[in-house]
């Protein structure tokens, strides 16, 4: 797994389109942090934190993994890796590990800067749980999306609905709150994770409420893994 991850890390920093998926979130995060007072709605400062999490998650993590897997399949690299002694889980783990670590470091830096300029979150442990849950969901959805994405060029289209959709859901909850249509918002991808981030930043949540909010996100992980198992291909579609 580690040799695959090291090779993939080198490829990531040589690929300009993939690098853009890292640069764009960083630029957007700087704007959100600088203009944080403009974005404070019902979600308060926690809403800005949620925007940072899902900007990194949607672009650096989700879109990059879909693009990477589609590119490796198109060049038959995935097929060649399966002829080695590495297992399928080890191959996938090696390919997504560099992007995953980059995403975690990126969101940690962004949230750290945001905390430094606006005040630390009320519940750091819950914030970590929320970020991990959101990233697991987006990772699983990336594997599922890669299954129906035949090329890196097509990935620019197939990743847009979920990338923009999760940020739109976060904005909907952050601006309007969850007083109306609460379970509709929570069941959408990223909805319950957004509420967890907002709660963790603004004032914490009771344990029972936090566990209840984790269920929809973990449910999306299960659904996405099932879809990935059904549709993921190791060779180009004919």
Image (cartoon, rainbow, N blue to C red):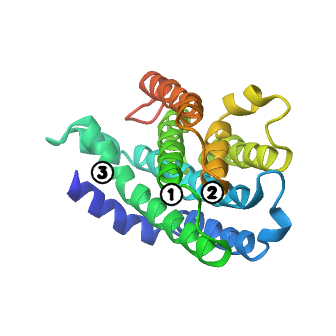
- The residue where tag 3 is placed is 94
- The residue where tag 2 is placed is 201
- Among the 4 quarters of the image, the one containing residue 40: bottom right
Which disc, if any, is residue 87? none
From mark 3 to mark 1, how far is it between C-alphas?
29 Å
Q: Earlier in the sequence, mark 3 or mark 2?
A: 3
From mark 2 to mark 1, how far is it between C-alphas?
8 Å
Front one among 55 and 113 = 113
- In the figure, 104 relative to 221: above or below? below
**Label 3 SS:** helix
From mark 3 to mark 2, how far is it between C-alphas?
33 Å
Is the residue marked by circle 2 packed among few (<14), some (14-19), or many (20+) residues within 10 Å? many
Q: Position of residue 76 (x, y in %)?
A: 36, 45
**Label 2 SS:** helix
- In the figure, 34 relative to 157: above or below? below
Q: Earlier in the sequence, mark 3 or mark 1?
A: 3
182 vs 23, left or right, is right
Q: Residue at x 44, y 30 (%)?
A: 232
Q: Would residue 5 be visible to someone looking at this image? A: yes
Q: Position of residue 45 (x, y in %)?
A: 72, 61
- The residue where tag 1 is placed is 124
Q: Residue at x 59, y 58 (%)?
A: 122
Front one among 161 and 137 = 137
Q: Earlier in the sequence, mark 2 or mark 1?
A: 1
- Among the 4 quarters of the image, the one containing residue 80: top left
Is the residue marked by circle 1 packed among few (<14), some (14-19), or many (20+) residues within 10 Å? some
Q: Residue at x 47, y 47 (%)?
A: 132
Q: Residue at x 40, y 49 (%)?
A: 72
């Amino acid at each position: 797994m580690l040799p695959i991850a090291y090779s993939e890390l080198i490829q990531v920093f040589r690929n300009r389109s993939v690098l853009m998926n890292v640069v764009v979130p960083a630029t957007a995060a700087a704007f959100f942090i600088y203009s944080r007072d403009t974005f404070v709605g019902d979600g308060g400062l926690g809403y800005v934190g949620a925007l940072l999490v899902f900007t990194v998650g949607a672009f650096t993590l989700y879109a990059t993994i879909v693009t990477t897997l589609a590119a490796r399949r198109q060049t038959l690299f995935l097929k060649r890796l399966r002829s080695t002694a590495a297992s399928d889980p080890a191959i996938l783990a090696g390919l997504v590990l560099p992007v995953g670590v980059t995403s975690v470091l990126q969101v940690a830096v962004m949230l750290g800067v945001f905390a430094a300029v606006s005040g630390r979150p009320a519940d750091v442990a819950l914030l970590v749980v929320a970020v991990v849950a959101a990233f697991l969901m987006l990772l699983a959805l990336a594997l599922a999306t890669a299954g129906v994405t035949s090329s890196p060029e097509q990935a620019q289209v197939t990743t847009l609905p979920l990338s923009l959709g999760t940020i739109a859901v976060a904005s909907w909850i952050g601006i309007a709150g969850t007083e109306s249509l609460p379970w509709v918002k929570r069941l959408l991808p990223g909805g319950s994770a957004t509420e967890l981030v907002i709660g963790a930043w603004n004032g914490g949540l009771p344990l029972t409420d936090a566990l209840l909010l984790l269920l929809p996100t973990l449910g999306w992980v299960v659904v996405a893994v099932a879809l990935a198992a059904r549709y993921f291909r190791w060779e180009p579609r004919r």
